[in-house]
Amino acid sequence: MLLPLNTFQDYGLLFLRIVLGSIFFIHGWSKVKAKTSKLFMFLGIAETLGAAASITGFLTQFAGIGFSLIMFGAIYMKKFKWGVNFTAEDKTGWEFDSLVLAAAIILILFGAGSISLDSFLHF
């Protein structure tokens, strides 16, 4: 190992949880406010609650599972239903969705870290 930065792993997981939770909160809350369909309302509420769970580190692995399912659905829609390329000049490709999916999978595999409600409540 080049630098002994692994002592800061819990801070890295905290940062990841905050950023990922913020992304899902913003996208989820916009769906809740839009009130376009029951499916979007459900997804918006799920994303918003998952975001709160991620940011606080409460049931983080379950939030990661939910985020992963949402992102698999988003990638499926973009790739197979709408025919969007991985990267696109005129619209958002699904490269961002893949990155968010990877972050969610990291939370599933690594958990919240010690700076979390999960750690405090011994989940």
Image (cartoon, rainbow, N blue to C red):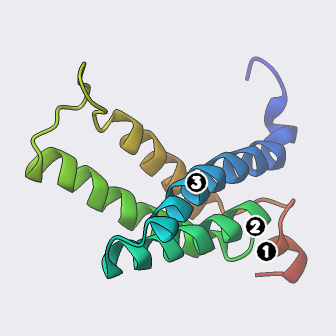
Q: Is residue 116 above or below residue 13?
A: below
Indicate the secondary structure of the residue bearing disc 2: loop
Q: Is residue 5 visible?
A: yes
At 19% from the left and 54% from the top, the residue drawn is: 77
Q: Who comes first in sequence, dot 2 or dot 1?
A: 2
State the residue in front, 50 or 7. 50
Q: Would residue 12 appear left or right of 120 to someone viewing this image?
A: left
| Rendered image: mark on residue 35 | none
Q: Which of pointers 2 and 1 indicates the residue nearer the eye?
A: 2
Which residue, given by chain and number where applicable, does mark 1 sit on? 118
Instruction: Look at the numbered discs 2 and 1 and tell me whether their residues touch, using CB distance below 8 Å.
Output: yes
Classed neighbour count for the residue bearing mark 3: other residues with Cα under 10 Å, few (<14), some (14–19), many (≥20): some
Mark 3 or mark 2: name the one nearer the start of the chain: 3
- Of badges 3 and 2, the one in the foreground is 3
- Residue highlighted by disc 2: 57
The alpha-carbon separation of the residues under discs 1 and 3 comes to 23 Å
Name the residue at 31% across, 76% down: 37
Q: CA distance from mark 2 to mark 1?
A: 6 Å
Residue 89 higher or lower than 75, as above or below: above
Q: Which secondary structure, mark 1?
A: helix
